[in-house]
Amino acid sequence: MDRDLVKAFMDEAKKQGLRTMAHITIHETTAKDWAELGVSSIEHWYGIADAALDGMQNFPPDHNTSNEIHRFGRAGEIWIQSNLNRKKLSDVLDLMIKNNVSWDPTMSVYSSCRDIIRAQNLPWFKDYLHPVLEAHFRPTLREHAAFFVGWTSTQEAHWNQDFNVWMEALKEFGVKGGNIVTGDDAGNMYNIWGFGMDRELELHEEAGFQPLEVIKHATVNGAKLIGMEDKLGRVRQGFMPTCWSSTATSREPSAAESLRNRRHALRWEGCKQL
């Protein structure tokens, strides 16, 4: 979206008293523009690394963004571009913090790009993957985010390297006081509801956050983003109960460290207490 259109969109949202989120595409605007114009949150990472490049991403001559093999293959190279300027990146993160822009990284949905064989063979699919969603996940160019047609180990290597820098940026954002929230973009790329959020919390810990910080991302920070910090996100008298708050109190906080092995018990035992 061009900046003048973003401005018009944001101006109207402010008049209506609406909060806004942005899934920024490869276009004229980057996270810098959206932060300057007052967006409430930025999803994924789109636009953040782009704003830190000296110039633009190096796309091959035959790149076609409408081809999702190209689109997501190159998306896994944005954070490892040779022209990524770390000073610019820090400046963008500082701007987001200054203007109260939250960051919802949704790393779990992209983790399949790091290891497609793992993503396709998750043990809980046997009991919880609906046939319609299973069909949607099958590699094809006819469905959105089902681009794993001829996916290579080289692309996985790029995505792993990309994740390292992405997580460094997320950690910097959090250490500086940025509001990090959790989301999983479930329904895409072998990521299903419930389990995708558990995976998201694991990846926040992998990014360098302590378990208690991860729980805060999933509770207090999310409530702050939607303007309901006086009703949600904490275990307090008069607050609305949530599965995550029940989960966090039904077991010791360090349980976040062992979500991989105890995810089923944590999810259902926490929710049953409501």
Image: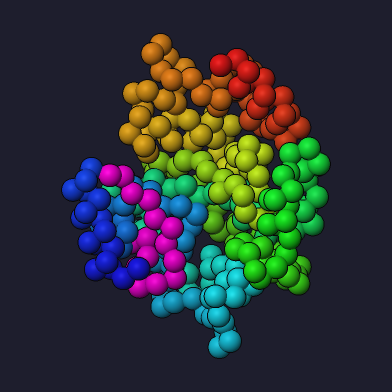
Q: Quadrant of the N terminus?
A: bottom left
Q: Is residue 252 visible?
A: no
**Is 115 situated above or below 259?**
below
Left-right relation of 22 to 15: right
Left-right relation of 227 to 120: left
Q: Is residue 69 visible?
A: yes
Q: Position of residue 53 (x, y in %)?
A: 43, 71
Q: Position of residue 47 (x, y in %)?
A: 42, 63
**Is 240 situated above or below 107?**
above
Quadrant in the rendering for residue 164: bottom right
Q: Residue at x 65, y 69 (%)?
A: 142
**Is 110 situated above or below 222?**
below
For the view shown, which residue lies furthest in the front direction? 132
Q: Quadrant of the C terminus?
A: top right
Quadrant in the rendering for residue 129: top right
Is residue 102 found inside the magenta-colored segment of the image? no
Q: How is the image coloured?
A: rainbow
Q: Position of residue 152 (x, y in %)?
A: 75, 70
Q: Nearer the viewer, residue 53 or 118?
A: 118
Is residue 31 found inside the magenta-colored segment of the image? yes
Specify the principal SS of the magenta part.
Answer: loop
Q: Position of residue 85 (x, y in %)?
A: 44, 68
For the view shown, which residue lies furthest in the top direction? 237
What residue range appears in magenta? 18-32
Q: Residue at x 51, y 24 (%)?
A: 242
Q: Residue at x 66, y 48 (%)?
A: 191
Q: Nearer the viewer, residue 92 or 136?
A: 136
For the view shown, which residue lies furthest in the left direction? 15
